[in-house]
Amino acid sequence: MLDLFDCQPPAYSRSAHDLTKFMSVLRPFIDQIIANLARAKFVEDPICGPHYSRINSVLSSVQKRHGPVLELALREGLRESVDHEVWTEPKFAISLAADTLVNSQSEEACRQSELPYGDTHRTIQMDVGAFHRIDQRIGSYELKRANGLHDAGKIRSMRRDLACTRLLLRSYGSSRGLRPQQADAKIVFYYGRRSIPAPYSLIGEELDDHFKFAVTARVEAANSYYRARVHELLKLMGAASYRQNEGATGGERDDRQAS
């Protein structure tokens, strides 16, 4: 029998009605990335030649710089939710006690444990920190494009950092003046290729339900603008290369005619 409760729409709208404020932050950030790429000097590959070497270098840089775009888009998108407090933590302190516990216990055992935050053995970056005021839930999120899978060494490192963060997160929230009743750390594999399975990860299409807010439409608005600016840059590069080739060909014709 069909369960009508399973068919109920979410308690939030999945669309973003006004992106003006959101894009006022994302647009200049993306424009600066494109401007830097347009000015950058790249090493010419002897096989590809100048034009294709530059195209290849720009495309590689575009993918690398998409990560910071996703991070900013998720933070600024969630900032528009009245139910969330959002921040980034460039130096989240991992204690020696956390590292030791993670190295000696299973993931499930670590999920049932907590440690006080404060001692610094090493630091990691928290891409997005979010506190849901209604659920009293604090979350730490690391953003990955996830259009491909990570190698085994990187996966081990990500798992260790996740477990350490989770151990310390509720105490960390208290140090920020919050009163979290729940705490969890996850990696967001945005384009869906999970290197770490659920419940330790999320993918892009799960973000709205997780945060109970239409953040995906906002992230996709930033992605659309970034994509358009990248395509615009590639077209300009193609036109510039065509003009250079035409100039070189014209010079050769003039030399032949003169001879």
Image: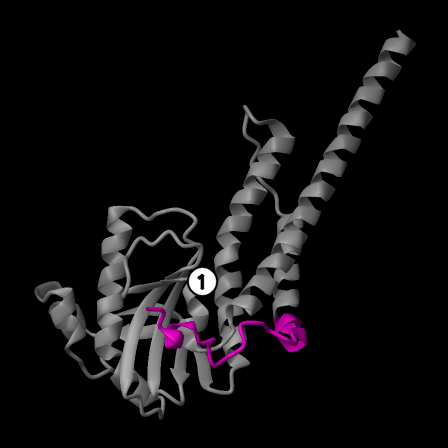
Q: Tell me: 239 left or right of 43.
A: right
Who is closer to the viewer here, 36 or 255?
36
The dominant secondary structure in magenta is loop
Specify the farthest residue to the right.
258
Residue 69: percent from left, percent from top: 53, 62
Where residue 46 sits: x, y (%)?
Answer: 55, 25
Residue 123 visible in the displayed image: yes
Q: Residue drawn at (49%, 51%), measured in percent from left and top?
A: 64
**Residue for badge 1:** 205
* Left or right placement of residue 235 versus residue 7 in this view: right
Chain part drawn in magenta: 1-25
Q: Amino acid at mark 1?
A: Glu
Q: Is residue 57 above or below residue 27?
A: above
Q: Quadrant of residue 118?
A: bottom left
Nearer to us in this view, 258 or 190:
190
Spot occupied by residue 131 in the image (x, y as percentages of width and height)? 39, 83
Please state which of residues 247 and 126 is positioned toward the viewer in this rendering.
126
In the picture provided, is 103 more to the left or to the right than 137?
Answer: left
Residue depicted at x 44% and y 62%: 204
- Image point (84%, 21%), residue name: 250
Residue at image coords 45%, 80%: 86
170 part of magenta stretch: no
